[in-house]
Image (cartoon, rainbow, N blue to C red):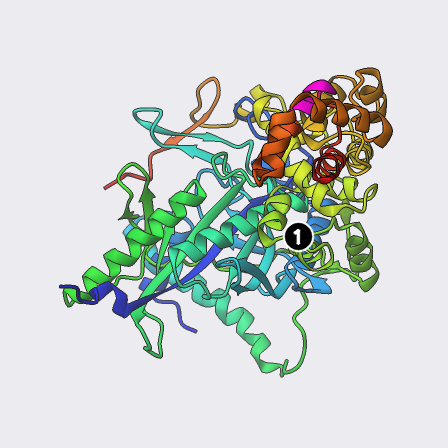
Amino acid sequence: MSTTSIYDTYEAVIGLEVHTQLLTKTKAYSNDEAAYGAMPNTLVSPVTLGLPGTLPLANKTVIEFAIRLGLATHCTIRERNEYARKNYFYADLPKGYQITQDKTPICTNGYIDIKLSETETKRIGIHRIHMEEDAGKSMHDVDLTDTLVDLNRAGVPLLEIVTEPDLRSADEAYKYLTEVRRLVRYLDICDGNMEEGSLRCDANISVRKKGAPQFGRKVEVKNMNSISNVKRAIEHEIIRQIDILEAGGSIDTETRSFDAPSGTTFSLRSKEAANDYRYFPEPDLLPVIVTEKEIARVKSTLPPLPDELVKKYTQELQLSIYDASVLTDAKEIALYFEDVLKHTSNAKAAANWVMGPVKSWLNENAMHISQLSFGGKRLAELIALVDSGKVSFSVASQKIFPQMVQHPEWTANEIAERDNLIQESNNDTLLVVVKEVVAKYPEKVAEYRGGKVGLLGMFMGEVMKASKGKADPKVTTELLKKELEQN
Amino acid sequence: MKIDSKTVQDVAHLARLEFEAEGEQKIINDMNRMLGFVEKLNELNTDGIEPLIYMTEETNHLREDVVHPPLSHKEVLQNAPKHDSDYFKVPKVVEKK
């Protein structure tokens, strides 16, 4: 007996707020270094400390990075940008307010497409992206009596990306986050490392009966430090909310924290009776005007983006969706593949090489593609060598490729010639060998002619052996067939 | 707008200020006087006039992304009421239930 689960009669409505820590050299509004992993409280300036009399000064690169992300997510880029103060007291926020953007987010109204399956994509609306600064880091569990505060992170620039409530499941949230991470890495604006906190995610989750016109009351969940934890937290929270509603209860609008070991969420006691951030314009920072010209300039510096590359690979180059997604998964691999494409027209072979021998070599040696000693041109030469029939793919990948890695100054052709790997496709020489083999096994020849055509493989093997593996299989097959089938 | 006891208590909480109970009435009176003073502005019709936020028309006052030396570790911590050799120390405010 199977009945529809009560859980299936509900749907979840999820919006995500993602904070990306930017890869700038300095902080958002002061020129002390923005770096992860330094000794505590060693990257701190008077501005970061919020000392009286200090003034913030906005970092140019933050605005450029915001424009990059806005363009990549199809947003409208705001011309006149202002900053605002968000006021609250917390020990890791020395000024007593965070400089952020309130009414004038730099990017609005964009989208990111996520892939639900091989054939299905879903468009997730981007409500806004705004510039702000990070707080310092508080450690509550280290010291018995006090909370420890490190201000190195205070003032590090962030872009907060807020979606529309378009996500309907934990799985969609997982896919969206994976896409955001890939995108910021392509754009070189954030390293996307959730474990180190350079990419952070808060989820707003509510549930409603399927078909209900209105959203349910939402709960905000924080402290999920990996993409799979975001998925787990959302899965748990959906069930928790449905259970409460089914038991006749109602959902409290509250902030909850994810507890990774148990996979559950717990309520964070609200810090203030009502969060009253008292936003007002930041008078210490002047407005920033982003001109059309500046947007065009930033646009011209954008790298090819994953969805554009996938389109190009599947439509122009006729590669499979699978190949295209493997090749574009990491930016560095995609750029390497692009480099190979510049020097060869055999896209399918190039894809196979990059996904095959190149990737296995990287995996086996725990190397990064940037450590591969030769560029796309060299690999294209190897592909050309295989295409010309002078070496087989297996000789190329097993005997030539490893040597190229060791000696980037050697070309594929040089290695093949030096090591005598050029396969015999000269028909005259090969024909002699073929004739010898056929003459050596008169009985097998008779069997073959009697209908045991499977013996062709055996003859092939013999020719290969006699030519020390250098016979071109295609030519050999033709010559053998001709030789065996005459008379 | 009229300031009452509740408003004073709310604002005091947000500003993390404490005061003696007998001082409250004086604060209420002071704040009402201040509001009364700026109330004068309501006599003007400001419909359609953008608020003045900046005292200059200047924009795009920006900085290149170049690192300058930070304060020394000792200087960073020296004004803190409580610290150890690495960190600022503050009262615990978050407890897991």
Magenta region includes residue A467:
yes
| Horizontal relation, residue A163 to residue A265: left or right | right
Pinpoint residue B8: horizontal percent, then vertical percent: 37, 59
Q: Is residue A87 visible?
A: no
> Looking at the image, which is closer to me, B80 or A398?
A398
Residue at 84% across, 61% down: A293
Pinpoint residue A335: horizontal percent, then vertical percent: 72, 41
* Quarter that holds the C terminus of chain B: top left
Q: Is residue A105 above or below residue A212?
A: above
Which residue is disc 1 drawn over?
A: A319
Residue at 72% across, 34% down: A480
Pinpoint residue A411: horizontal percent, then vertical percent: 84, 24
> Looking at the image, which is closer to me, B81 or A197?
A197
Helix, strand or loop under label 1: loop
* Quarter that holds the N terminus of chain B: bottom left
Q: Is residue A77 above or below residue A303?
A: below
The dominant secondary structure in magenta is: helix
Classify residue A384 by image quadrant: top right
Classify residue B26 by image quadrant: bottom left
Q: What residue span does the magenta drawing correspond to?
A: A462-468
| Horizontal relation, residue A180 to residue A472: left or right | left
Residue at 28% across, 68% down: A10
Classify residue A26 by image quadrant: top right
Residue at 46% across, 56% down: A16
> Looking at the image, which is closer to me, A346 or A169?
A346
For mark 1, name the chain: A
